[in-house]
Image: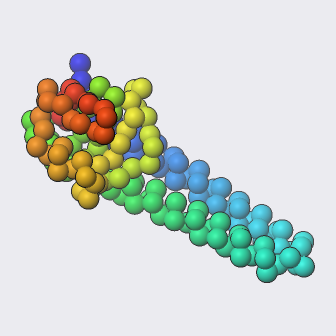
Amino acid sequence: MGLNRKEVFEYIINTLDKNLIERRELNKKSIQDMVEDDDNNLNHFESNTENEIADLSRETMSLDYLASCLDAMNELVLYENTGEKIGKGTIVDTNGFIFIVGTSLPSLNYEQKKVVGVAPDAPVYETLLSKGVGENLQLGNTQEAILGIY
């Protein structure tokens, strides 16, 4: 039996949403800790502030990336798929991976498989569009059999 498209999308969306909430809480705590530390240690304010701003900037980019992935998944779930042709919003199941066509994603796992987002500018994107169930997909030194399209 193959994957359930709706369940896979729900899992990814829920996981991204949960990660985003957790990261926002951590970011909020980091800001609060930074303010408290700076209040207690004004002598090192300038050097501490530069490092803390750099850390917060990286964290903000990470939050923005997660938010954009979540937005993309909420859009892709609306695409209909016939299960015959690969296109934007398609889930491609292989022996080792689950590909989500049309977006990039952070590292995720679903049912012992690595979930990989395939953005339109990814080298494998065009290759995937020409494949069907039963065909093989070459990924570097690895060959993946396409088990299902959802």
Image-based side of 130 in relation to 35, left or right: left
Residue lying farthest to the top in this orientation: 1
Residue at 66 percent of width and 62 percent of height? 28
Query: Is any part of residue 24 visible from this angle?
Result: yes
Instruction: Work out whether residue 37 or residue 80 is closer to the camera in this orientation and state it.
Output: 37
Q: Quadrant of the N terminus?
A: top left
Examine the rendered structure and indicate whether residue 136 appears above or below residue 117. above
Residue at 78 percent of width and 73 percent of height? 48
Number of marks in the rendered image: 0
Examine the rendered structure and indicate whether residue 86 appears above or below residue 146. below
Query: Is any part of residue 7 visible from this angle?
Result: no
Residue at 40 percent of width and 26 percent of height? 111
Image-based side of 12 in relation to 88, left or right: right
The percent position of residue 142, horizontal first and vertical second, equals 31, 32
The percent position of residue 49, horizontal first and vertical second, equals 74, 76
Q: Quadrant of the C terminus?
A: top left
Residue at 28 percent of width and 54 percent of height? 122
Q: Quadrant of residue 81?
A: top left
Q: Quadrant of residue 51?
A: bottom right
